[in-house]
Amino acid sequence: MAEVNAKTTAAKGAAAGDRRYLLGLAGVLLAALAASSAGILLRQIETADGWQILFYRSLAFVAVLLVYICAQRRRDTFSAFLAIGWPGVVVALALGGAFIAFIFSMLLTTVAQAVLILSASPFFAALLGLLFLRERVAPVTWISMTVALTGIGVMMGQDLFFASDSGGVSGGALAGSLVALAACLGYAAAIVALRAGRRVDMMPATCLAGVFAGLVCFLLTDDLAISGRDLAFALLLGSAQIGLQYLLITLSSRHVPAAQITLVMLVEVVLAPLWVWLGVGEAPSSATLIGGAIVVAAVLAQTLFGLQTPSD
């Protein structure tokens, strides 16, 4: 009888684990859908400039994360912010800078080109992890990184040598690609810092990234007055788009392996350009499609390999 009860308990535990995994996977998919809305929401803004958009986006982002942190930590909220240490400071600065560069990259070039360049951030994180954390980089990662950089080179080469024919939304397409690359490096640095401080809750550091971005925007803009329509879309960018994205990934990461999260988040790379193409007719250039396909193939290959490799 005891053996039967043990088997029943184990079966129930496995079933509960499967349910949590499926719920986690659904959460990651919803996070990817939320992330993919950045470009189309940004294209709905009529007159606000980048600094104004970022200021209100940051406010909404900080509000969402602060509510979550307070609900989770309650009386320990202040202590949670103090506990982030130097890794948390790096997260706040690097991620806050990436938030700023992300928005300006989409204002300067096509959404497709920006998100495809940003999708290479795991490779830069691997390189920074080697330099600062002495983490081993697998041969397949070096190969995938080289392939991804080739794809980025194809996209940026279009802007450099054929600027007048590029698919960018302005003459600053090359600048947009460079800013997207800066955002990519910022996200990569934040990933490495998160790993360095992985024994501490880093959600407060992520919240502080929004505070840092908002403060920079406040200091660099002369006027925060924007229309009600633009304000609504800026707040949506901070709450429903990036705030919801970070909350869902944080909750889902408890039940879904990191490599699988990276794989599912590739949905953003596919959908973000599709939404702006269908919504506002912003079609990516041929070089963006070719270079983007190379980058996505590299990320996909690396992620699939990660599914077969135990994480430390």
Image: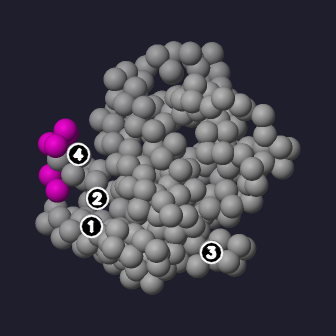
Seen from the viewer's position, the closer of residues 219 and 140 is 219
Q: Position of residue 123 (x, y in %)?
A: 28, 58
Q: Earlier in the sequence, mark 3 or mark 4?
A: 4
Name the residue tied to disc 4.
129
| Residue 41 higher or lower than 283, as above or below | above
Task: Kindly state the secondary structure of the residue where label 1 is placed.
Answer: helix
CB contact under 8 Å: marks 2 and 1: yes
The structure's colour scheme is one colour
Residue 47 appears anywhere in the view: yes
Residue 258 appears anywhere in the view: no
Q: Which residues are magenta?
A: 131-137
Q: Give residue 282's mark.
A: 3
The answer to if 134 sits in the magenta stretch is yes
Left or right, 114 with respect to 304, comes to right
Residue depicted at 78% across the width and 34% down the height: 225
CB contact under 8 Å: marks 3 and 1: no
Q: Nearer the viewer, mark 3 or mark 1?
A: 3
- Cα separation, mark 3 vs mark 4, equals 36 Å
- Cα separation, mark 4 vs mark 2, equals 10 Å
Name the residue tied to disc 2.
123
Name the residue tied to disc 1.
149
Q: Earlier in the sequence, mark 3 or mark 1?
A: 1
- Identify which amino acid the numbered label 4 is placed on: Gly
Residue depicted at 41% across the width and 62% down the height: 174
Q: Position of residue 191 (x, y in %)?
A: 37, 45
- Cα separation, mark 2 vs mark 1, equals 9 Å
Q: Earlier in the sequence, mark 4 or mark 1?
A: 4
